[in-house]
Image: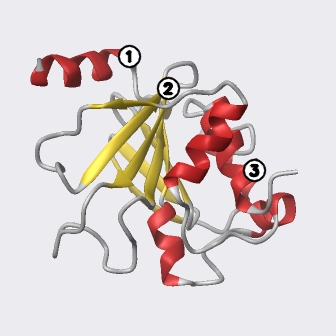
Amino acid sequence: MTPYSLAFYLDVVTTGTVLGLGSTDSPDRVTEVLGEDFGENAFDQGMCRDYGLAEFYWDRASVDHPWSGHHFTLKVYRLAYRDRTLVDGVFRARYGRFTPRLRFEKLRRLLERRGVPLLEIPEIPANAPYFRTFWQPDSHVAVSVIGTYGEYSTPDNLRVGDVYGIQAPMAPEEVEWRRARVG
């Protein structure tokens, strides 16, 4: 058994879901699984629900239309602040204790043992060289990693090689767009 939160991250990267919730799930479905303890930022055409470690995003064409799932992110960098209330009880109940840092090479090694490769893709120029992005082509999950330290560019409490965040989905079209920009 993979210890603690590593199993959670392996599940997310492999499946492209958070506790079975995908990026297209409705706000009601996310609340059903993760609970009602969230912060919400909503305006006419967009909404975000912040569950501490996980955030889910929705958009809609107008206030007369239903919410449509857009993406989710795991704010892994927040764990380094060591706030015990950050990880919702639903996550702890299933996966146990979450460590303050997630080392990318450890995550990558465990994923490769399971036949789940992460491919490095070009970073957005504004984020390079401070961040590096790795993509899982089957689940469309992107993993952002600290590439080098930069004052005011990267968190002081993370080290080079720590995972900054995980997001899904990252469409193959975005990956190709990034590759074309450097090609």
Do residues under tags 2 and 1 come within 8 Å of each other at their CB atoms?
A: yes
Do residues under tags 3 and 1 come within 8 Å of each other at their CB atoms?
A: no
Q: Dividing the image into 4 quarters, which one contains the C terminus? A: top left
Of badges 3 and 1, nearer the viewer stands 3
Residue 91 image offset from top left, x and y in percent: 75, 61
Q: Is residue 98 left or right of residue 23?
A: right
How packed is label 2: few (under 14 Cα within 10 Å), some, or many (20 or more)?
Answer: some
Residue that label 2 marks: 140
Residue that label 1 marks: 172
Q: Is residue 178 left or right of residue 42?
A: left
Of badges 2 and 3, nearer the viewer stands 3
Q: Amino acid at mark 2?
A: His
Helix or strand or loop: what does disc 3 sit on?
Answer: helix
Do residues under tags 2 and 3 come within 8 Å of each other at their CB atoms?
A: no
Please give the name of the residue rendered at 39% of the width and 80% of the height, measured from the top-left corner: 157
Would you place residue 11 above or below residue 154 in this image? above
Q: Nearer the viewer, residue 76 or 103?
A: 103
Q: Nearer the viewer, residue 43 or 139?
A: 139
Q: Which mark is residue 7?
A: 3
Q: Amino acid at mark 1?
A: Pro
Q: Is residue 133 left or right of residue 21?
A: left
Would you place residue 177 above or below residue 122 in this image? above
Helix or strand or loop: what does disc 2 sit on?
Answer: loop
Report the Cα–Cα distance between label 3 and label 1.
25 Å
How packed is label 1: few (under 14 Cα within 10 Å), some, or many (20 or more)?
Answer: some
